[in-house]
Amino acid sequence: MAQIFHRSTNILSRLTIYGALFILAGLVWAAYIIYSSPYFTEVNVARQQPVPFSHKHHVSGLGLDCRFCHTSVEESSFAGIPPTETCMTCHSQIWSDSPMLEPVRASYRNNTSLEWTRVYQLPGYAYFNHSIHLNKGIGCSTCHGRVDRMPLTYRENPMQMQWCLDCHRNVERYVRPREDVFKMDYVPPGDQLALGEKLVKEYKIQKLTDCTTCHR
Amino acid sequence: MAWVLLGACRTDMHVQPRYKSLEPSPFFDDGRSARPLVEGTVARGHLRIDEHLYTGKVNGVDVDTFPFPMDRAMLERGRERFNIFCSPCHDRTGSGNGIIPQRGFRHPPSNHIDRLRKAPVGHFFDVITNGFGAMYSFASRIPPRDRWAIVAYIRVLQLSENATMADVPPEARVQLQREGP
């Protein structure tokens, strides 16, 4: 009986076996790109909010300090989203009949919570704490970017594990003097590494990379 | 391979049956996971028996003393807190010309008028704690010790706004004269 496949088809089968490797690698690569793309990590995507609250307006425009609204950021793991009362401190008189602010007034009248769409939310199995980062000289803008330029809040960093670890392994590249952590326009000096190494010693910063630091 | 693709799925451990701060709750009628206090109860560590420290009054009268000693660190703390919470309206010097009144909020009085310079410290504490006219209470935002630090700093501002050259220590006088006011 004659052969069904001519000898020359052997080369085809070799090619497909070999090629499968590339296809596989290609798929892995595609998955990685999707995984770290803005579509998935939601970086730079502004959220729809019940009220179009603008950090740009309130922080750059009016010069408010982060802590006026995020009161617990220095003492606690949780930075705090301001309650309606905080908005009403000013909006009881300012723009007090603007329809844009009606949800705020309704929330105050009826004692209900304004439901902000969260921008950053780690999964339930990861632990994060603000106070330690501030006390060790990590500024808001290192993680959240120039919030003071955001008309609507969006994600600056993916907050994926790789990103956290990159800093935990190389803190000296990011640390700044403690008194500057709230400064939005802080620019690292030219000799950041020298300053970083000095501050790492001074603040006794450890390299926390054990899994149990964040998964507890 | 499968692991990488599955890594992209958000399931199971991602959503755990516990509440992170302020997460909404389907369990309670008002949908809040942060529960308000049950009436008639006091959270641990929040018992307010020291009237002086927590109300700025003794037997209903504003006190004119601080409930704990004020040192330099406390004043620095007071300055920081004043600049965060009060300066948007009262201005960094306490003049009352902050940016918010400039945008249409009611103008607060200057802290340097006679009435307020003579007011006892308990009055300032009371204003921060309970609000005053158009000004809202800051009790939930500023803990009592910080409120006292702010009051002490207001006293410092009142002193500095009405200071004369005689109040400046001799070492500092030369520098002041060189730099001008």
Image (cartoon, rainbow, N blue to C red):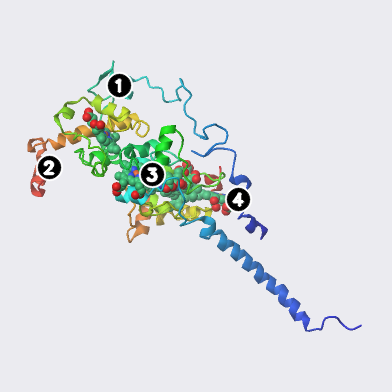
Q: Is residue B114 left or right of residue A47?
A: left
* Mark 4 vs mark 2: in front: 4
Q: Residue at x 54, y 57 (%)?
A: A40
Residue B66 locus on image (x, y percent)? 26, 25
Per the image, the residue denoted by label 4 is B10
- Secondary structure of residue under mark 2: helix
Q: Is residue A152 left or right of residue B77?
A: right
User: In the image, what residue type sits under mark 1?
Assistant: His
Q: Chain of mark 3?
A: A
Which labelled disc corresponds to residue B172?
2
Number of residue marks: 4
Whether tag 2 and tag 1 are in contact, CB under 8 A, the answer is no
Residue A173 position by quadrant: bottom left
- Secondary structure of residue under mark 4: loop
Per the image, the residue denoted by label 3 is A99
Q: Say above or below: A23 vs B100.
A: below
